[in-house]
Amino acid sequence: MYPNILRHPGPTPIPKKVQLAMNQDMISHRSEEFVQLFQETTNRVKPIFGTKQDILLLPSGGTAALEAAAVNTVSPGEEVVVITVGAFGDYFVSICEKYGFHVHKLETAWGDACTEEDLAAFLKPLSNIKAVFATYNETSTGILNPIEKLAKVVSNQTDALFIVDGVSCIGGAPAEMDQWGIDILVTGSQKAMMLPPGLALLSISKRAWKVIEENQTPSYYLNLVSYREWAAKGMTPNTPAVSLIFGLSAVCDLIDEEGGFTQTMARHELMKNMVRGAMKALSIGLLTSDEYASPTITAIRTPEGLELSSFLRHLKQNYHLDFAGGLGSLQGKIFRFGHMGYCFPSDVLEAVSLMEAGLQDFSYSFEPGAGVRAAQTIFLNANRK
């Protein structure tokens, strides 16, 4: 039985070391062993977020942490801005509308980033904005928003909190939460963090804590003050995902073994360049510009003359290569090549090679080996530097 070559934007492959860590004997989440595990592991995650603030762990998907960030900071009727550049930005809109916030939606075309000029112009006529919500890496389009620059605009023009969804890039992209002025940064376990789904991680600035403490919107399971109080004791208020926290500790080990998080980010940048170079060599279009291209996922336009669903099904059935299709208005128009977490240049070369085999099966006109050669050249040149 051939293994499935999972090149999705999440869930992503799990390293053996992480699997073994998660298979340890269960411990009580109120034990001294857990307190030590929790404190050591959350401290080790701080550099990935670029923060000195605590890392809180929720036994949930990333969406619950995004909802927690919203409901703990904003009350019904208060005004917020939501920057949306794709499907997951729209999720933030839905969360905010569900709680009765007055939403100002800053929307760009799918495939384009939100620039600092876009945000500055949008904010100019607005006042009394309580929070600005943004997606750092838009999974549906492969856009990496210029979050550092957007944070500066928010700080210069408003008193609003800046709340960022980093679910599909934290662990693979630069994040300097404290330095950039991000007030709440959220990620999930199942993408660049190399874990199965079920664990959300977030960090909160001192400024945001003051807002949270004064917020009157009721919440129980997602009450972040409760998570902070229990985190001070090295625990969580409710039953945590103990096995995933064992795995998170192993993820930190792997990052250390790679040479630190700087090397991990460089690997993701290299894989991005390899994928994009390969597609250009194959004359296959890319949805996003090089300037705002994600280091964790590449959105690739449907090769000319191919019916996409048939092509993707063929790749999976015949070559065990599993790409993700497009979402929303991009369904059938793009597919998404995930290169995050436990993924390496050799995996990119494998996927491009198998994709070329599929293209030949569908009589797509190209020079066989051109994509692999382009990706390999980028890889070799990076190693020679």
Image (tube, grey):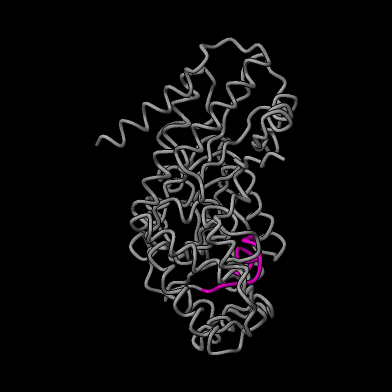
Q: Residue at x 47, y 73 (%)?
A: 41
Judge whether residue 372 is colored magenta: no
Which span is picked out in magenta? 56-68
Instruction: Indicate the quadrant containing the N terminus: top left, top right, bottom left or bottom right.
Output: top right
Residue 81, visible in the rendered structure: no
* Looking at the image, residue 158 lies above or below residue 320: below
Quick one: 38 or 319, which is closer to the camera? 319
Q: Position of residue 100 (x, y in %)?
A: 70, 64
Q: Position of residue 86 (x, y in %)?
A: 60, 42
Q: Residue at x 55, y 66 (%)?
A: 247
* Looking at the image, residue 135 lies above or below residue 350: below
Q: Position of residue 27 (x, y in %)?
A: 62, 82
Quarter of the image holding residue 72?
bottom right
* Looking at the image, residue 179 lies above or below residue 334: below
Q: Residue furthest left?
A: 385
Instruction: Indicate the quadrant containing the C terminus: top left, top right, bottom left or bottom right.
Output: top left
Q: Residue at x 47, y 17 (%)?
A: 370
